[in-house]
Amino acid sequence: MNKSVKFVLDDKIVKVDFAKHPELKPTTTVLNYLRSFPDHKGVKEGCAEGDCGACTIVVAETDVDDKLNYKTLDSCLVFLPMIHGKQLITVENLAIEENKEKILHPVQQLMVETNGSQCGYCTPGIVMSLFGLYKNHNNPSVEIIEDALTGNLCRCTGYKPIVEAARKACTNNGFDHFSKNENKIIALLKKINSDKETILIKNKNQKYFKPFSLSEALRLRKENPNALIINGSTDVALRQTKKNELLSEILDISSVEELKIFKKENNNFYFGAGLTLEQMLKYSDGTIPALEKMLSVFGSLQIRNIATIGGNVGSASPIGDCIPVLFALGAKIKLRSETSERTMPVEDFIKGYRQTDIKSDELITEIIIPEYDSSHYIKSYKVSKRKNLDISTVSGAFRLKFDEEIISEIILAYGGMAAVTKRAVNTEKWFIGKKWSRENVEMAMKILTEEFTPLSDARSEAEFRRTVAGNLLMKFFVETKQI
Amino acid sequence: MKDIICHDSAKKHVTGESVYINDMLVNDQLLLGKVVFSKYAHAKIKKLNIKKALKVKGVHAILIAKDVPGENQMGPVIHDEFCLAEKEVFFIGQAIALIAAENEYALHQAENLIDVEYEPLEAILDIETAIEKNNIIAPPRKIERGNPDEALKNSPHIIKGELKTNGQEHWYLETQTALAVPGEGKEMMIYASSQNPSETQAIVAEVLGVSKNEIEVEVKRMGGGFGGKETQGNHVAAWAALLANATKRPVKIHLFRDDDQIMTGKRHRFFSKYEIGFDEKGQILAYKVELNADAGSATDLSMAILERAMLHADNSYFLPDVNIMGKAWKTNLPSNTAFRGFGGPQGMAVIENAIDKIARFLNKDGTEIRLRNFYNFEKNNFTPYGQKIENNRLFIIYDKIIESSEYFKRRIEIKKFNKENEFYKRGLALTPVKFGISFTTSFLNQAGALVNIYTDGTVLVNHGGTEMGQGLHTKILQIASAELGITPDKVKVNATNTSKVPNTSPTAASSGSDLNGMAVKNAIDIIKSWLAEVVISEFEKNYPASKTLKENIVFENNFIFDKENPDKKISFDEIVKIAYLKQVSLSSTGFYKTPDIYFDREKGQGNPFYYFSYGMSVSEVEIDILTGQHKLLRTDIVQDAGDSINEGIDKGQIEGGFIQGVGWVTTEELKWNKDGNLLTHSPDTYKIPTVNDIPKDFRVEIMKNIPNTGTILKSKAVGEPPLMLSLSVWLAIKDAISAIGNHESEPEFSLPATYEVILLSCEKLKKK
């Protein structure tokens, strides 16, 4: 077993040997690691929960075509071993020196010219998000620019000059000094990634396993049933960063390639559990609109770039945005252990508040979503305190099928209305055999509000939740009645 | 010299080189500090035992109230704020102990081992309860003119109402931070993230029990302030200093985000009651308003904030007979504090909402009522506190924005849209801002500077203002470069330091450039006068044919010349060298005080403001009446900045201030539970605007050709006023809601208009 983590930083392979550095834990975040160096203090902590983006960095990894893929991440939520085999790019790497003069990267130069920084504290994170945008898009639309910046809070500028900087900078097909250096970096990464031996980092309080194959992951899962399974760790990391919990055992499956496969077969979409939500968003674009819509307002790009579908379902949060959609779509979940494999509806898999049916030797390997023809109407809605980068107050995902104007199938799944994602079963029953009319919908709204006893909390009072839940049904009606 | 130049730190910001306190490289003796705070809103401390905690490996000191060597106080105006709690705690987040340790792990372990026992006492958690219990923090204030009761009685129409405006968390990106480095003897160097270094110096000296000349405070830059570091930056500095003093090692405190949100004060919540009398045309005849502010547990700046709220209760409108009462109430919450606008927004929100109601009542457009009641030129031009409105810009801005925003055309389009759409409604509103510039505590309107010219011709400017992103140092750099007639690359603005410029006022009240710019100019004028004499003697030597008069000497483009005879010239660098050799000083202090302002608090009368800044905005929103979600479709802003010193920076202030205001009026919700715990204590639940929340179409214009008189380079302050322009968004939302009932009934409304407020208001109208 390997005991160290390797990645590329400042164009060199860095080997982190935890045994030699007692100040580092396997769960030391990339943010804190970087900030321990005098020349990497540009990266800032603004919230330690992935909500502000001041800690945004870019990670480059080789994709299937052997090209480098640049992704923005919130470094406050990423543990060091998670960047093993990748290139870590920080704000200090963007400008280059030529003839003793500092040449700014186009995104930096434009940020200066547009007055895109005021106090400057969020700026390194913003610059990194712009850099990610620069590498991935040419002449991006306002929507793409806004999406790239959603995860970066700025309290000074009002964002307008930053959007302008993005628009003006991203015009060169992503070409820059990183492009020139890509072959060298790819070679370095290959050197690291040729070694597929499981990484195990141990100190007196913690054990961290990082396998590179599904069989190895399943073996470790069986041997260490209490280890927390992480992939993007956007949920689990908060237990450390916000609650100072010591995460004693971790099984990091983010480098298991078998879990990152997407395929479409026999009218089913098969999503590997390790696919990121950003990958899910791309795959569902044009094929599963209700899922695409929900994912498009899921967290921020930095979160979607690392959070996975397996994690979102596995954490079984009552406000996990994907779950109601998976309920409505009648999605199934595939679980595997070393010796067995089973498939069950996602709905049955979720057992309670953050509780699932997973067995102590199993991993979620796939989410299977059936394809629906145009006789099904499927929609999803999310209501939060703020349109973007927010957790649902209430979410709803609905599926409807008629048989000659009469409702023959209906699923009304809600998040945020109970301790778990829950279907409005009584309302569903009531609808069967009835017409999809405004009158009936108004009647159903009353039944629906009686089905739930939502909570009052920081996000809203119960009355708001109850009202919205009913109104979403009306919204569904309004959006489907024309068809 | 008013060429657009970028923020002087912009390059360092974008490359990550800018150093904030938490980035400073300190020697390996550095300890980290942590504040242990109360978990009860009001309780007696029955037991506080630190023995076990002290044994944690890596812990160097744990301090409680009795360990404070000086005065255990840190209130800036009134000494009613304990540095460390003594026998009782008054809010959740109040400091009760301080820990210094070698690492975070030790800090957390020690914190968990501190044994505290409380005996909970009854807590007052809202203004209504405070009023009921008569828990007032200081005597009420009043501003009155005429006989408002009589005028109300004689008014054809009266509208009575109440309005709640919630507070606002500053959410500066850099949380409160300070680094204290002990020197020899009693000396202490403080690196602070403070808008008020002189007060930080004073508070640190007081808690340590040493004189001010032992304490040096330096502020390089803040990662945002917005008022939140005007007094409350002092707290972390005092705590870090106490730990540094106890351990004789450098100690840094950098608050964790959630702790910062829980511990520090916010924009004041207000609960206001008003009565407004008017005629059929919408002419306001009388206005009575009672502004009740939630001061929190201590006075802090509450009385000054309340005062500014009262002085802005009129906003831009002439109120013939008027009574403005102000009361600040004590509650068991962190002491509320300065926040961009400083009470102005709360005072203005009430009258803007009242005018909105008048318009709905009379079935007229809001702009008609506003225009009718604007302060005028020859008559109706005195404020309730007796200050005459001069250089009134309301009408030119109004005309401009009505035209550029196509207000009336869009009003018709919106009507049509609302008729055709059952589930989406649009709303439109125009709101003005007239904001008084100057500290209302008149003596604060002073500033100092120290300008040094070095023998290589470079200049170092020190002044009393602090840089928090607003671009003050950039403007000062432009001013120095313009006044000395040298290019900006030769000028550097230094970190603010109490040893260079003493006894400074906070960088607040939008006054940074006005006050410090003038002080810098005055320092430069003194040096220029000395240099001019050197120039004259040089010209006499080099050009003996004619004499040069001192008043004809001009500093421009790195040269000094005789404007009567421009061939007679000498370079700036050269004259500096000559002056040095001739033993002429190249360094001077400068001082400035704003002339002719005063305010009699007892009488509520005076000329508290040197001038007013004006602006207007028109906003259009769309609401989804099934979910309460709103979209900001378009905002037009026209702002008066006098002759802007730097349009790029001023635009940044206008856009940024406006969006911050949009947060206050829409998504930013402070919510406490019944025990006084802040529920929205992180960005997970406290939602400031993201890039998606700015207007889809956002047009900002700075008025041209309206120079200000008597200010530095004829400019105007622009830091705070734009925040209040966001009231147009708030009232556009209300306009959209009221479209449900065809604008016939008044929607239920408060501030912020969260999705929840919008939805529930819509539901009520639907049921009508």
Image (cartoon, rainbow, N blue to C red):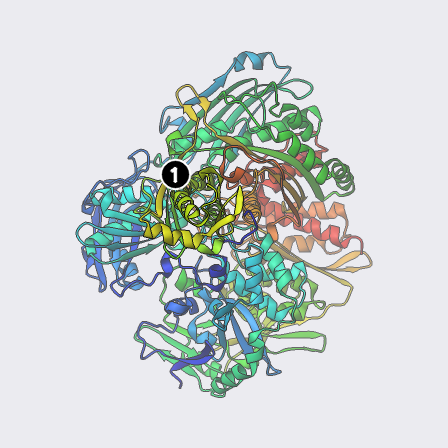
Q: Quadrant of the N terminus of chain A?
A: bottom left
Residue drawn at x 24%, y 51% as measured from the top left: B188
Q: Position of residue B544 (x, y in %)?
A: 45, 46
Residue drawn at x 37%, y 40% as measured from the top left: B590
Q: Chain of mark 1?
A: B
Q: Position of residue B509 (x, y in %)?
A: 45, 37
Relative to residue A188, is residue B340 depicted above or below? above
**Which of B561/B74 is in front?**
B561
Q: Secondary structure at mark 1?
A: strand
Relative to residue B125, is residue A55 depicted above or below? below
Occupied quadrant, residue A136: bottom right
**Residue with the mark numbered 1:** B447
**Which of B545/B230 is in front?**
B545
**Residue type marked 1:** Ala
- Whether residue B223 sits left or right of residue B642 in the image: it is left
- Whether residue B585 sits left or right of residue A288 in the image: it is left
